[in-house]
Amino acid sequence: MSYDRETLVAELRERGVAYLAPSDALSVNPPPTDEALLLALLEQPDARLRMGLVPLFIRHPALAGDVERLAARLDPSLRLELQTYYMAAVYLQRLWRSRLGFYLDTSVLLPDLYSQAMGLPSADERFGKVGLYDLADGWQIRSSYPFDRLTALTKVMDHFFGQLKIESLQQRYA
């Protein structure tokens, strides 16, 4: 089933990923499960919305089980895309763990589900940095689009940290 952009933006906002659009988007006919949401985001033509998977995984490490179940049902190319977004979150969570700890509970790390299968370094090697660079390089090679994946992931984290900082200030002065 296909979901409109505004519904997906609203669903992400409800799950703590609000930097995409500070809008009044409403969730109309939301995906019935987390797996359905992940699939809808993965199939979304808007790259910024697909990138919303990364902070969603970081904010909700329990989604790892949904990722595994969904990946088992996908065709190989879509499975690789899901695994790529997931592993980006795994590497970024470790790379930014100290800074994320100012805003989120970082005691539960995303499990490293796919580094071996994808031929990538362990998520713990140099706090995820080596794996992140290798992942971004491989993603860039597979892509027919010219934008730099590492830069895109860095921008996602910048936006996410901006959102977390605003949330922190709002809580402090509420």
Image: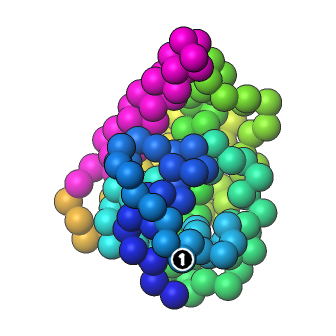
| Residue 70 image-quadrant placement | bottom right
Q: Position of residue 23 (x, y in %)?
A: 35, 49
Q: Is residue 143 left or right of residue 55?
A: left
Q: Label 1 belongs to which residue?
A: 29
- The one nearer the camera, 58 or 148, is 58
Q: Is residue 95 above or below residue 131?
A: above
Side of 50 where 126 appears, left or right: right
Does the magenta run of residues contain 20? no
The stretch of residues the image draws in magenta is 147-174
Q: Position of residue 35 (x, y in %)?
A: 66, 72
Instruction: Report how many numbered discs are placed on residues in the image.
Output: 1
Task: Tell me the residue at 51%/16% (across/down).
Answer: 169
| Quadrant hosting residue 131 | top right
At horizontal 67% and vertical 85% (from top left) the residue drawn is 73
Residue 36: tell me if it is visible.
Answer: yes
Residue type indicated by callout 1:
Asn
Q: Which corner quadrant holds the C terminus?
A: top right
In the image: residue 104, left or right of residue 30: right
Instruction: Give above or below for 88 relative to 5.
Output: above
Q: Quadrant of residue 105?
A: top right
Tell me the SS state at disc 1.
loop
Camera-side residue of 109 and 142: 109
Q: Residue at x 71, y 57 (%)?
A: 63
Q: How is the image coloured?
A: rainbow
* Residue 138 place in picture, x, y as percent: 42, 59
Main SS of the magenta segment? helix
Q: Residue at x 71, y 80 (%)?
A: 72
Residue 150 is a magenta residue? yes
User: In the displayed image of the protein, which residue is found farthest to the top?
Assistant: 173
Does residue 141 appear in the picture of this structure? Answer: no
Q: Is residue 24 above or below residue 30?
A: above
